[in-house]
Amino acid sequence: MHITSNHLLEALRSQGLRITAARRAVCAVVAERQGQHLTAAGILEDIRSDQGSKVDQSTVYRTLDALETSGLLVHSHLGHGPAVYHLEAEAAHQHVVCRACGAAVSIPAESLDGWIIILRETTGFEVDPTHFAITGLCAECAARRVPAE
Amino acid sequence: MHITSNHLLEALRSQGLRITAARRAVCAVVAERQGQHLTAAGILEDIRSDQGSKVDQSTVYRTLDALETSGLLVHSHLGHGPAVYHLEAEAAHQHVVCRACGAAVSIPAESLDGWIIILRETTGFEVDPTHFAITGLCAECAARRVPAE
DNA sequence: GTACATGCAAACGTTTTGCAGCGAA
DNA sequence: TTCGCTGCAAAACGTTTGCATGTAC
């Protein structure tokens, strides 16, 4: 599934919001970079360099917020650092991230299915199976350290 | 298992650190409030009200950091807001965080044990079972929205 | 006495907010 | 024309750091 900038703008319009140059710029970057982990700062820089236009950071945050309200975008806080945004409709990219070296390991999606179902039955919580990051230590870093932190 | 303030201070001493009034105050709160999700700000307030003494926030952070180095304390980032601290010796639990309302649900660590073991055997990755949050929708928010499945 | 720890204050990175003017509808 | 949106600047937030003083050992 491919989301275009127009899809995003249409979602904003259907919320009764106006289509402005700033919102076009943000949506263009979000559509262009889909599949990546976007940060507000990264989007801001893209707009400045790729498009040469100037949009304020507060406007970027406000637009991302509107896109989240529309349900097309979600953000997560993966530990330290800025929040990361990605399209809700993106393909699953489940991975675990090494907190020491930053390496990402892909894991089979099905392996968690049973647990997700149990969690839903016991707590009502709907785990988002398409996107979450788990931290830990990759094989290399685990061998180098005694797990502590 | 009950951890006392002295356990914590002893751990600091064995790192070659000095026992000071500020560290006593922080350890007292951590020991007293075990089982709860502590924040740096909450610890600071406890010290001020419960004990009437004054400790600077930077000292609280530095002491918590030292306790983490000792391995007795861990912290997690549950999305928005401040980091939460809890004793390592406490019953391990995962945090599941609602991406809509930010509510955090604690779940027993054992429910993931099988999966963690499989992951270690297949990829060598050592999941840190206390330091990650899984995103999803809590029961309330899931009921309010139709999940874009 | 000598490191080390502290309080203070200021800096930090990320995000939010107040406001006057601009611009989409 | 109207009200929503914008840029700007400043504040808010949680956390970290530099430094002179204080204190455990």
Image: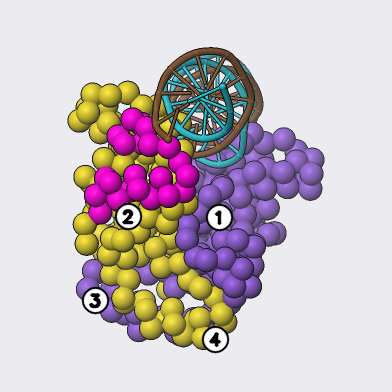
Chain colours: A purple, B yellow, C cyan, D brown
Q: Is residue A136 magenta?
A: no
Q: Amino acid at mark 3?
A: Glu
Position of B29 relative to A139 (above/below): above
User: What is the count of numbered marks?
Assistant: 4
Q: Is residue B12 magenta?
A: yes
Question: In which quadrant of the rendered view does residue B146 lie?
Answer: bottom left
- Pointer 2: what residue? B87
Discs 2 and 1 share one subunit = no
Element under disc 1: strand
- Pointer 4: what residue? B122
* Residue at the spot 47% in from the left edge and 61% down from the top edge: A148
Whole-percent x, y for residue B22 in the image:
36, 31
Question: Image check: B113 left or right of A76?
Answer: left
Nearer to us of marks 3 and 2 is 2
Label 2 neighbour load within 10 Å: few <14, some 14-19, many 20+:
many
Element under disc 4: helix
* Residue at the spot 22% in from the left edge and 73% down from the top edge: A122
**Residue in front for this viewpoint, A99 or A127:** A99
Q: Amino acid at mark 1?
A: Tyr
* Residue at the spot 51% in from the left edge and 73% down from the top edge: B126
Q: Is residue B69 visible?
A: yes
CB-based contact (under 8 Å), mark 3 and mark 2: no
Which residues are drawn in magenta?
Answer: B3-25
Cα separation between marks 4 and 2: 30 Å
- Pointer 1: what residue? A85
**Residue in front for this viewpoint, A145 or A140:** A145
Whole-percent x, y for residue B145 in the image:
33, 62
**Mark drawn on residue B9:** none
**Residue in front for this viewpoint, A29 or A112:** A112
Cα separation between marks 1 and 4: 29 Å
